Amino acid sequence: MDNNDNNKTYKIVFVRHGESEWNKLNKFTGWTDVDLSYTGKLILINCIKIGVLEALDAGKRLKEGGFSSFDICYLSVLKRAVKTWNNIADVIDLHNIPVEKNWRLNERHYGALQGNIRFIYSFFIILFN
């Protein structure tokens, strides 16, 4: 091992996925594989994916901050994480690096709470505490 290897510095960047459909509805998401969120006018005519816009903005901010080159990308297997990375990679023009997907990077599993509205359960916790 070369002594210079000990002096290398590495940067780790963490990015959360863009807003998902269930984030927008304030639902427990967990491992449910929901897509990035939409908003739009006239029943989804000219719709804009808010989650995609957030991902593109993250890519822009990374690029402006000098983070336009990475050695590897680690993702959960959930499509909201994959689509967020794909949009970031579009902005920083970096589709040629290895992408490792692993279920261990998924969000917390909420069990029976998944799909339920967070407010309702928060209310019951406050009420019965």
Image: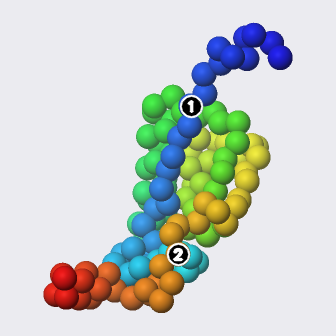
Residue found 19% across the figure and 82% down from its top: 129
Residue occupying the far right of the picture: 1
- Please tell me whether residue 123 is drawn above or below residue 90 in the rendered image: below
Residue at the (53%, 40%) spot, across then down: 13
Q: Residue furthest top?
A: 3
Asked which quadrant contains residue 121, the reply is: bottom left
The percent position of residue 87, horizontal first and vertical second, equals: 57, 55
Label 2's element?
Answer: loop
On the image, numbered disc 1 is attached to which residue?
A: 11
Q: Is residue 103 visible?
A: yes
Q: Is mark 1 in CB contact (under 8 Å) with mark 2? A: no
Give the residue type that dot 1 points to.
Answer: Lys
Q: Position of residue 32 (x, y in %)?
A: 55, 80
Count the numbered circles shown. 2
The kind of residue on which mark 2 rests is: His
Residue 33, above or below 19? below
Q: Which of these two is toward me, 8 or 70?
A: 8
Q: Locate residue 122, reporting x and y percent.
A: 25, 81
Q: Residue furthest left?
A: 127
The answer to whether residue 83 of the structure is visible from this angle is no
Image quadrant where residue 126 sits: bottom left
Color scheme of the displayed model: rainbow
Q: Residues within 10 Å of mark 1 (few under 14, many from 20)?
A: few
Q: Which mark is residue 109?
A: 2
Nearest to viewer (mark 1 / mark 2)? 2
